Image (tube, rainbow, N blue to C red):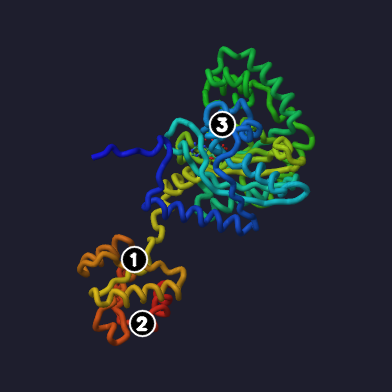
């Protein structure tokens, strides 16, 4: 036998037994954002490498070591998108969506990062994200956070996630703080973990969210970003907290929360869980007022978040929330013998036309009833329709309940849709 070719490491297939979970999650995400009046935006998976360098930042984990970058046949430098925000801003600028107007957008799709694959961390993963443009007030921050809270409610997992909140202040405030932090950390350089030593010179704020206990011990006495915040950012944060308090959204203020991308200012937040081990951040976001201009547009305030769908599904699965998803098939239709096949196929067609949401699978490939019922069971059908010669002569079919003890029935073909509608209710 020829050698089988394997998928690229860290990139997963979504096999048919997993797709009901994905569809369930995606449908719910779509339903919730629709409830807020947001519009979908779709952008290409490939972009110019320059886009991510300029937005995410040259000295970030993503740009330094995680991007899938290559030259195409023309020698153009392209990158498989590692995240969605830069792409949405690029598309918004290019499509004239952002200048002097308000946009409330969402997207969903695959992202690519060359990281070490492990539970909850993959090289192709999926993000669902929301981006709001043209609104500088804390009400917009509050709405995107409310939306995430509604999602958790929707999935029945509100008690499993906590909201962590911080303000990064203005770029100027952050720059001043950065200098003070570096000054402090340089005095303790020997005590820092290796990653932090490196970041100290490239991206010092990231030292704050180091997982190393010794580094965390050093940070106890470090200058606090809070003390360097500008007045505008302070007021913004205060208003956001008031709104969240009024709306009953609980949060923890975490002044070590900095996020791994350069473009954030003012609000940053993460929803974290204890249920997934080290990969505990399910959703992360914040305000990025400078990015639109940085990517060549007119200055436009913006706020948004991205959610890792694999982690969300892992979490829902751990909580048993994916145990009772509906099967892919409602009705399994079978012909008594070959002479009834066209009538049986036609009956299934008529049902699909009359009941567009009913999932009708027709048996294919012949075989006896035993085999046909086995298939019906395998696909999870709740009803079997048997189109037999004798019943057909009277304009009837047999209807058998596969998931309940109800008696088999004989139904007039003309009444079939009505009867099924009553049963499926
Ligand atoms: P982490 O700290 O876990 O690496 P991040 O800060 O790099 O996350 P973001 O870039 O903010 O993550 O992406 C938002 C969300 O996307 C994360 O909270 C997570 O749920 C998900 N995510 C990020 N990277 C991966 C990955 N490699 N595999 C699966 N999900 C991911
Ligand atoms: Mg990361």
- Position in image of residue 64 (x %, y %): 56, 26
For the residue carrying disc 1, how many other residues have a C-alpha within 10 Å: few (<14), some (14-19), or many (20+)? Answer: many
Q: Nearer the viewer, mark 3 or mark 2?
A: 3
For the residue carrying disc 2, how many other residues have a C-alpha within 10 Å: few (<14), some (14-19), or many (20+)? Answer: many
Q: Earlier in the sequence, mark 1 or mark 2?
A: 1
In terms of depth relative to the viewer, which is nearer, 225 or 129? Answer: 129
Spatial CA distance of label 3 from label 1 is 53 Å
Residue at 39%, 73% in the rendered image: 349
In terms of depth relative to the viewer, which is nearer, 37 or 52? Answer: 52
In terms of depth relative to the viewer, which is nearer, 18 or 319? Answer: 18
- Position in image of residue 353 (x %, y %): 45, 74
Residue 80 visible somewhere in the drawing = yes
Q: Which disc is residue 75 wearing?
A: 3
Q: Which disc is residue 381 wearing?
A: 1
Spatial CA distance of label 1 from label 2 is 19 Å
Q: Which quarter shows the C terminus?
A: bottom left
Q: Is residue 258 above or below residue 26?
A: above
Quarter residue 271 falls in: top right
Quarter residue 81 falls in: top right
On whether ligand 1 comes within 8 Å of the CB at mark 3, the answer is no
- How many labels sit on residues? 3
Secondary element type, mark 2? helix
Quarter residue 226 falls in: top right
The residue under label 2 is 413
**Is mark 1 in CB contact (under 8 Å) with mark 2?**
no
């Amino acid at each position: 036998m020829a050698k089988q070719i394997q998928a690229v490491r860290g990139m997963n297939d979504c096999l048919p037994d997993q797709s009901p979970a994905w569809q369930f999650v995606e449908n719910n995400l779509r339903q919730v954002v629709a409830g807020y009046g947001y519009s979908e935006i779709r952008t290409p998976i490939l972009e110019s490498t320059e886009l991510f360098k300029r937005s995410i930042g040259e000295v970030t984990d993503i740009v330094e070591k995680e991007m899938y970058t290559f030259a195409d046949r023309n020698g153009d430098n392209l990158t498989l998108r590692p995240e969605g925000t830069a792409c949405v801003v690029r598309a918004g600028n290019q499509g004239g969506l952002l200048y002097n107007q308000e946009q409330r957008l969402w997207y969903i799709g695959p992202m690519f990062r060359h990281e070490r694959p492990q539970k909850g961390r993959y090289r192709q993963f999926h993000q669902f994200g929301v981006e709001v443009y043209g609104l500088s007030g804390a009400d917009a921050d509050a709405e995107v956070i409310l939306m995430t809270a509604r999602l958790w409610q929707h999935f029945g997992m509100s008690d499993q996630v906590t909201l962590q909140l911080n303000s990064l202040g203005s770029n100027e405030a952050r720059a001043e703080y950065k200098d003070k932090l570096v000054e402090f950390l340089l005095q303790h350089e020997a005590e820092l973990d290796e990653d932090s030593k490196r970041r100290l010179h490239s991206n010092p704020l990231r030292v704050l969210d180091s997982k190393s206990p010794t580094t965390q011990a050093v940070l106890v006495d470090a200058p606090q970003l809070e003390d360097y915040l500008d007045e505008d950012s302070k007021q913004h944060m205060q208003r956001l907290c008031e709104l969240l308090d009024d709306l009953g959204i609980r949060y923890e203020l975490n002044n070590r929360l900095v996020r791994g991308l350069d473009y954030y200012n003012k609000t940053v937040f993460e929803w974290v869980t204890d249920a997934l081990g080290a990969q505990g951040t399910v959703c992360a976001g914040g305000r990025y007022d400078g990015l639109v201009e940085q990517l060549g547009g007119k200055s436009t305030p913006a706020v948004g978040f991205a959610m890792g769908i694999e982690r969300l599904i892992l979490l829902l699965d751990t909580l048993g929330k994916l145990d009772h998803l509906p099967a892919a098939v409602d009705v399994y239709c079978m012909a008594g013998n070959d002479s009834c096949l066209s009538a049986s196929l036609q009956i299934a067609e008529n049902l699909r036309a009359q009941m567009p949401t009913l999932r009708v699978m027709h048996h294919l490939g012949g075989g006896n009833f035993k085999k046909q019922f086995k298939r019906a069971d395998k696909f999870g059908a709740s009803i079997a329709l048997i189109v037999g010669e004798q019943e057909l002569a009277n304009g009837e079919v047999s209807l058998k309940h596969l998931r309940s003890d109800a008696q088999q029935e004989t139904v007039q073909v003309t009444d079939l849709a009505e009867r099924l509608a009553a049963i499926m209710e």
